[in-house]
Image: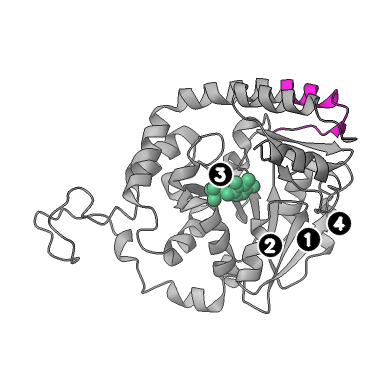
Amino acid sequence: MIDLQHLVRPNIRKLSSPFQQGDGQPESPRRIALDANENPYNRPLNRYPSGLQHDLKARLAKLKGVGEKEIFSGNGSTEIIDLCYRIFCQPQTDNAVAIEPTCRLYGHFAAVNDVEYRPVPLSHDFQLDADRLLKACDRHTKLVWLCSPNTPTGNTLEVKEIEKVARTFQGMVIVDEAYTEFSKQPSFRQRLEEFPNMIVLNTFSKAWGGAAIRLGVAYAQEAVIRLFDMIRPSYNLNLLTQEQAVELLRHRYDIEDWTRILLLERNRMMKAFESLACCERVYPSSANFFLARMKDARSVYNYLAEKGIRVHDCSHEPLCEDCLRITIGSKAENAEILGILRYYNPAE
Ligand SMILES: *Cc1c(COP(=O)(O)O)cnc(C)c1O
């Protein structure tokens, strides 16, 4: 059992009872709205959007098989990552533990919030060792960051090791599943009842093709979601985002098609990379990108950049020396990068 109240920062704990977000109330009909200093002109953009996002959450709940009250939506997962620190971590006192290498946002927002960040290296095949990670935790560790499928490595973390962390660690475990749609591994979203200390992150920015609308979603037990709702900026999800997200959810079969095509393309690209002279090794992937170890990552990166093709150079990250992370593009884009790399000649 975790003691959620005890985990929350004292100043946030105090907010809880009397304070209610103005936009978190069930909407009572406003026949004439003269209460919020809005402008009566320029409909429909003149009104503050619903803070409860009922339509969006109802659709998500149905599609994802969770309760509406187990959903929090943020201005991208990026906002949710920041909010996790602000709810749970006392600056200069608490710390967060994370796998390494992984998404850079966890370390960035630790620094922003003046919270100590403790990266624990994955094994050489990029796997999580629960015991090793748990050893880095102490009584001031409030958050553990796991990412599966992980970036930039592309692999999923072993379910058994994630379970072990979640069952043993006495703080919050965040499982960032930004790439879950590309993976065969079932989402931890389905197991919230088992793990009261788990927060699962999804995003509209990757498989859903909605990076521009900035929408991230956290799934957790209701008591945890209430904490996010207590401290989020009012109206954090703008009307245009809510409308566009509902539109995407209506077209979810398109998203399944895109995902299928991207996975086929990924496998084709990975095979092609394996046969390139400049490539040493391609790592297994469960995402819409893959990690490739090159003979000389920097020079391949520069060669591609000169031709206007940008890939992600992760050679400076631990365990990723000479590695490039390549996102799967459209068929034409993939064909182009392969064509250009076949002409790459480092001697020139
Ligand atoms: C892209 C990404 C994010 C950020 O998602 P947004 O919803 O666009 O803010 C978070 N975590 C991981 C692992 C990502 O790859």
Query: Which numbered disc flags the more N-terminal residue, 2 or 1?
Result: 2
Cβ–Cβ below 8 Å for labels 3 and 2? no
Is residue 155 visible in the rendered image? The answer is: no
Q: Under tag 2, what secondary structure?
A: helix
Quote the CA–CA distance across marks 1 and 4.
11 Å
Camera-nearest label, 1 or 4 = 1
Q: Secondary structure at mark 1?
A: strand
Callout 3: 10 Å neighbours few (<14), some, many (20+)?
Answer: many
Q: Residue at x 46, y 44 (%)?
A: 212
Say which residue label 3 marks: 202
- Whichever of callouts 2 and 4 sits on the residue coming sooner in the sequence is 2
Front residue of this view, candidates 164 and 288: 288
The segment highlighted magenta reads 268-287
Residue bearing mark 2: 107
Residue type beneath disc 2: Gly
The circle drawn on residue 287 is none
Q: Which residue is mark 4?
A: 132
Q: For the residues carrying marks 2 and 4, which lies nearer the camera in this image?
A: 2
**Crowd around label 2: few <14 · some 14–19 · many ≥20 (10 Å):** many
Q: Nearer the viewer, residue 313 or 42?
A: 313
Task: Say which label, 1 or 4, has the lower sequence index.
Answer: 1
